[in-house]
Image (spheres, grey):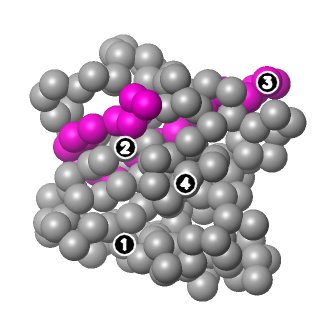
Amino acid sequence: MMLNKANTFLNLLNFGSDFVKPGHDQYVYGHAIGLCVTGLAPTHVAFKDAGGITAVDFNVGKSDRSGIKNAQHFESDTAPCKVCTQSDSYIVRCCVEGSLLEVNDRLIKHSKFAELSVNREGYIAIIMPKPADWPKVKASLLGLEEYKKLREIS
């Protein structure tokens, strides 16, 4: 499983399990300079659908999030995109309150990055939370060992 391949990276991650809905697991990588990189955790339900992820759509809600020019302030439950499979679609959440600096619009053309390169090209968004908010956000997420225990991953 992807968890073993990227262990060094994953040790720096925090996880939002069942974020908003059961099985909608996401990761948040808190970078040393204060940025948060978010994406789908390897156990997200979209990866379990036959054929995997077939599309990523940043045109969610009231605006198209691809090609962001000015940072938009998002709540933790704001949807930067949805991921689609052959049989369903899943709304992805920010997981962190802050300014949306970038969405990974490469996923529009290469949706397989979301599952094949979760720790590199497969991120969904980069968010800048207020520095004072990060400890509270991190406390609400699971560490790697808690996540592995919850999902019964060795």
> Is 30 left or right of 82, judged from the image as shown?
left
In three-dimensional space, the C-alpha distance between marks 3 and 2, rounded to whole angstroms, equals 23 Å
Magenta extent? 80-106
Residue 125: which numbered mark, if any? 2
Residue 97 highlighted magenta (yes or no): yes
The answer to whether residue 77 shows anywhere in this view is no
Among the two numbered marks 2 and 1 on one chain, the one whose residue lies closer to the N terminus: 2
- Circle 2 sits in a helix, a strand or a loop, which is it? strand
Could you give the CA–CA distance between mark 4 and mark 1, rounded to whole angstroms? 20 Å
Q: Within 10 Å of the Cα at label 4, are there few (<14), some (14-19), or many (20+) other Cα atoms?
A: many
> Which image quarter holds the C terminus?
bottom right
- What amino acid is found at the position of numbered circle 3 in the picture? Gln
Q: Quadrant of residue 82?
A: top right
Which residue is at the front of the view, 107 or 151?
107
User: Looking at the image, is mark 4 or mark 1 earlier in the sequence?
Assistant: 4
Q: Position of residue 93 (x, y in %)?
A: 47, 42
How far is disc 4 from disc 2 in space, using C-alphas?
12 Å
Relative depth, front residue between 104 and 93: 104
The reply to whether discs 4 and 1 touch (Cβ–Cβ < 8 Å) is: no
* Label 4 vs label 3, nearer the camera: 4
Amino acid under disc 1: Lys
